[in-house]
Amino acid sequence: MKRISTPFRQWRHDGRLYAVLSAAGFSLKAVFVKLGYAAGPVDALTLLAMRMGFALPLFAWLVWLSRARASDSHAPQAPLSARDALHIVLLGLFGYYLSSLFDFYGLEYISAGLERLILYVYPTLVLVFQALARRTLPSGRVAQAMAICYAGLGIAFIHDVGAATQGAQVWLGSAWVFASAVTYALYYLGTGAMLARIGSMRLTGLAGAASSVLVLAHYATTGHPSELASLPSGVWLNAGLMAVLSTALPVYWMALAIQRMGAAQAAAFGSLGPVLTVVASWALLGEALSAYQLGGLALVMLGVARLKPAPSATAGAQAGSDAATSKRAA
């Protein structure tokens, strides 16, 4: 027992335990969505509204926790201006609102494993947007890494299209998830200016709370709130687990990991996400696990590992890697 507890304490002390827990929590999000769909007749907007309803007080807890930590360290938090508030609402719009809504739409049609691979290529979109903003072409290394990413994604996609009874649904679902990756990349680019001054946990809590309000307002005006009480308990259970285990706690665990090992090392553990999603979807959802999927997964992970941010954006990207990793829950 002592031999087991000693490595456990070491991993907890140096932050590896929290980084792994964070990656595992984020990787289960798509699995909870699929389980929610399977538990009863529920659409994407309703399931997302349930998730964000559960998550709203948890986002408030993250904001309170960031304030408590600032008080303990005798470092007062910067006050929020009206411009900051607008910026946070825009981040909420592109983060847990649009990005999550598009993702939930996509998961109605494609496997959790393919969904995770599509979302995982978001760094390529960040670099494309940066190149467009600077009117420059990506370097040869970046172009090569992007080619590897999309080659792997193409292998997994073609396999899923061939295995599906209705290939058109795979195209539609993949398009929705790719739109989710695009909106997340826009969110990522929008965080840099505020991270150093506001802090990642506070910003994530505030942007998440803004997203929750937007999602709930959308559902209240276009959804069917009166039908919530009649939904099966399994739908409620998976929405609650998604809010706690795949939204709030991974953000908290990632903050603990960053505190102990630094943002760059903690973010590196995010590469476990696609692997854990594929394994979890195979074990819990019964999704097929083929050599094509594993090969595509390996290429996507290799390509992302070879990507490097533009030099002028490196400082901002490193400072914000903790928040970017935590927002993968979207």
Image (cartoon, helix red, strand yellow):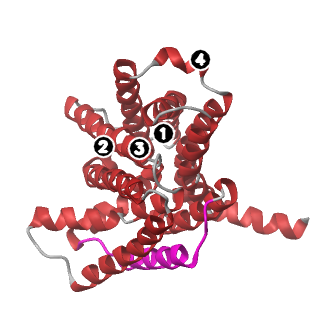
- Residue at 64 percent of width and 54 percent of height: 285
Q: In the rendered structure, are the residues bearing label 1 and label 4 in contact, judged by CB atoms less than 8 Å apart?
A: no
Q: Secondary structure at mark 2?
A: helix
Q: Earlier in the sequence, mark 1 or mark 3?
A: 1
Q: Quadrant of the N terminus?
A: bottom right
Please name the amino acid that badge 2 sits on: Phe
User: Marks 2 and 4, Cα distance to the nearest angstrom?
Assistant: 29 Å
Query: Label 4 belongs to which residue?
Result: 229
Q: Residues within 10 Å of mark 3 (few under 14, many from 20)?
A: many
The boundaries of the magenta stretch are 287-310
Q: Earlier in the sequence, mark 1 or mark 4?
A: 1
Side of 39 relative to 122 (left or right): right
**Closer to viewer: mark 1 or mark 2:** 2
What is the x, y in percent for residue 313?
24, 65
The label shown at residue 94 is 2
Residue 236 in the magenta stretch? The answer is no
Query: Label 3 belongs to which residue?
Result: 105
Please name the amino acid that badge 4 sits on: Ala
**Closer to viewer: mark 2 or mark 3:** 3
Q: Earlier in the sequence, mark 1 or mark 2?
A: 1
What is the x, y in percent for residue 105?
41, 43
Residue 305 in the magenta stretch? The answer is yes
Q: Quadrant of residue 133?
A: bottom left
Q: In the rendered structure, are the residues bearing label 4 and label 3 in contact, judged by CB atoms less than 8 Å apart?
A: no
- Among all residues in the image, which is located at the extreme left? 135
Query: Label 1 belongs to which residue?
Result: 66
User: Marks 1 and 4, Cα distance to the nearest angstrom?
Assistant: 34 Å
User: Marks 4 and 3, Cα distance to the nearest angstrom?
Assistant: 22 Å
- Residue at 63 percent of width and 56 percent of height: 21
Q: Secondary structure at mark 1?
A: helix
